[in-house]
Image (cartoon, rainbow, N blue to C red):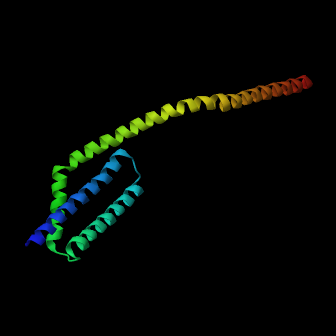
Amino acid sequence: MGNNQAYTFLLFILNGICIGIFFDLFRILRKTFKTSDWITYIEDVVFWILSGVITLYFIFAFNHGEIRLYLFLGILLGIVFYILSISKYFIKVNVFIIDTIKTVLGKTIAIILYPIKQVLKLILFRPISFVFINLKKLYIQNITKIFKKTTKKQI
């Protein structure tokens, strides 16, 4: 390989590392957010389409559209290097960050919503429950009056 081919080979190793990172981003999403099988299938299709687009971009941008075996070997080498060396740490760090954000965000939202819930209880729920409780009492009183009238007539 000449200098230009060595440079291109290194770029395609980088392409493989990018695809590995991209793959791990989908894995991180699956670990931190529970998704249905349909969403997983859609994510897989999106991954393969975007990986293909990235690879085609690299082929056209850095190798003038020429497809060579060493390009795919570079991609494979980049993916293997990434998975064996960095992937585990990349996933752990990002899952931790997302879980922390979800926890902090959940607690922040709960703190923000607490006063709103209390105000809604005072403004909406108490008057509504008051009306329903009184309607229930009125209904029961009317039923008992009707029952008493009908039982008196029978006796």
Residue 76 left/right relative to 151: left
Tell me residue 78's x, y (percent).
17, 60
Residue 78 left/right relative to 121: left
24 vs 153: above or below: below
The residue drawn where x is 67% and y is 28% is 126
The C terminus lies in quadrant: top right
Q: Quadrant of residue 40?
A: bottom left
Q: Quadrant of residue 5?
A: bottom left
The residue drawn where x is 16% and y is 52% is 84
The N terminus lies in quadrant: bottom left
Tell me residue 112's x, y (percent).
51, 33
Q: Quadrant of residue 9?
A: bottom left
56 vs 146: above or below: below
The residue drawn where x is 35% and y is 38% is 100
Q: Which residue extends farthest right?
A: 153
The residue drawn where x is 8% and y is 73% is 2
Tell me residue 34's x, y (percent).
39, 47
Residue 83 left/right relative to 54: left
Tell me residue 76's x, y (percent).
17, 63
Q: How many marks?
A: 0
